[in-house]
Image: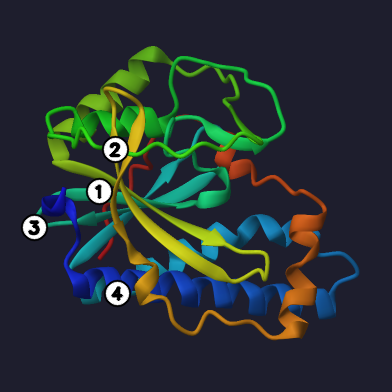
Amino acid sequence: MEQYKFDTGISKTIVQAIVEGYRDYIEHRMDRHNKMKISSAFAWTKGNFIESKIADICSDLNFSYKKAKAGLTWDYLQFIQGDTKKLFLIKNAAYFNENSFSQAILPNKGNNKIRRTYLHELSKINKKLEFSTNHQQVENPSRQSIQLSFKISEDLVQDDLNHFQELYNEFHILTYEIDDAFQISKIMHYLPNPGDNIAYRIDNLSKYISGAELTDNEKEIIAPDTNNNLIDPAEYDIGIFQDDQEEKN
């Protein structure tokens, strides 16, 4: 599936932006920790910092971005490569299940399935693409998938879906993984297949990671994120609704 890879220069720039966005998040966490009596809720803003940093470099890559809603309560950014009409977004690998991408991962919890999520709807952009038959599934026995049930207008979902399929040729997902040392250690590029709900691996971008090392002091500040099992609410909303604002370069 080489034809779906991003150009090397683009991949390197996106990876660097992910790392820098995460570092901005850590600096903000340290600042809030020093100035506030309680600041643990800022753990939920990590994705905003990473997406914002990618938005900052969009003009350098001839990309645009737009704000969309991951359901009822959470906004996120979609990124568009204008000349190829590729749409991609960024996900935290801790909640991402490549074998069933429309279902977020929640450790040691049961399932609560619904019909659709915004990832599944967006993946239908790829319904005419050719996928490899040699996909290697990865088992995660200690992690199960969950989908939360929210009522969203069927007509609104279908209207947005038709709009997306007219505008874009491909839909991609990039994931970042944070290791036990609280550092970004892995970045993967996937192409989701709406037919089998599998996210097919396109490229391992981890080779482009640099400057991700953290100091002991930085690790101490963000370590409670994992120890307290905080769950990012952005990963459990559904929907594909967009703001009416224009794309930004």
- Comes first in the chain, label 3 or label 4: 4
Spatial distance from mark 3 to mark 1, Cα to Cα?
A: 11 Å
- The relative height of residue 154 versus residue 110 in the rendered view (above or below) is above
Q: In what element is the residue under mark 3?
A: loop
Would residue 90 be found to the left or right of residue 165 on screen? Answer: right
- Mark 1 surroundings within 10 Å by alpha-carbon count, few (fewer than 14), some (14 through 19), many (20 or more): many
User: Which labelled disc corresponds to residue 83?
Assistant: 3
Would residue 4 be found to the left or right of residue 94 on screen? Answer: left
Residue to which mark 1 is pinned: 87
- Comes first in the chain, label 4 or label 2: 4
Q: Foreground mark, 2 or 1?
A: 2
Residue to which mark 4 is pinned: 12
The kind of residue on which mark 2 rests is: His
- The relative height of residue 111 versus residue 219 in the rendered view (above or below) is above
Look at 80% across and 75% down and name the residue there: 220
- Point out residue 108 in the picture as x, y percentages from the top left corner: 72, 33
